[in-house]
Image: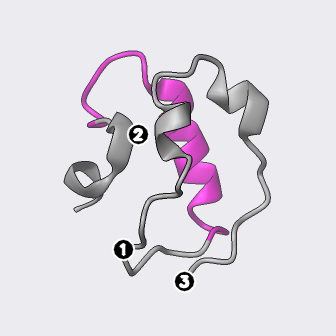
Amino acid sequence: MCEPECPAEAILPDTESGLEKWLELNSSLSADWPNITRQKESPADADEFKGQEGKYDKYFTPDPGAGD
């Protein structure tokens, strides 16, 4: 469900090579972060971040969001 719904190709199939870092991150955080159960509108500035390099280092935080 997430892969076709997510904008900017943010979700990749876990069968691709080179994604071990992301699989480990997903495994560790999915136990604590809230589930997304409803589709929301994309942020107004979403297109500004498309294709931007280094987003993980610039914006990632291990703190979970509020969820729905």
Q: Residue at x 54, y 83 (%)?
A: 68
Residue that label 2 marks: 10
Q: Relative to residue 2, is residue 66 depicted above or below? A: below
Q: Relative to residue 39, is residue 15 depicted above or below? A: above
The mark that comes first in sequence, 1 or 2, is: 2
Residue toward you, 3 or 45: 45
Q: Are marks 1 and 3 in contact (CB under 8 Å)?
A: no
Residue 68 disc label: 3
Question: Mark 1 and mark 3: span between their CA atoms?
Answer: 9 Å
Question: Mark 3 and mark 2: span between their CA atoms?
Answer: 19 Å
Q: In this view, does 44 lie to the left or right of 11?
A: right
Q: Where is residue 36 in the image (x, y as percent from the top left)?
A: 46, 74
Residue that label 1 marks: 39
Q: Residues within 10 Å of mark 2 (few under 14, many from 20)?
A: few
What kind of residue is marked 2? Ala
What kind of residue is marked 3? Asp
Q: How crowded is mark 3: few (under 14 residues within 10 Å), some or many (20 or more)?
A: few
Residue toward you, 13 or 40: 40
Question: Magenta span has 20?
Answer: yes
Q: Position of residue 2 (x, y in %)?
A: 29, 58
Q: Are marks 3 and 2 in contact (CB under 8 Å)?
A: no
Q: Relative to residue 65, is residue 66 depicted above or below? A: below
Q: Is residue 38 left or right of residue 22?
A: left
Asked which secondary structure carries label 3, the reply is loop
Asked which secondary structure carries label 2, the reply is loop
Question: Magenta span has 64?
Answer: no
Question: The magenta stretch spans which residues?
Answer: 13-33
Q: How crowded is mark 1: few (under 14 residues within 10 Å), some or many (20 or more)?
A: few
Asked which secondary structure carries label 1, the reply is loop
Q: Quadrant of the N terminus?
A: bottom left
Q: Residue at x 33, y 52 (%)?
A: 6
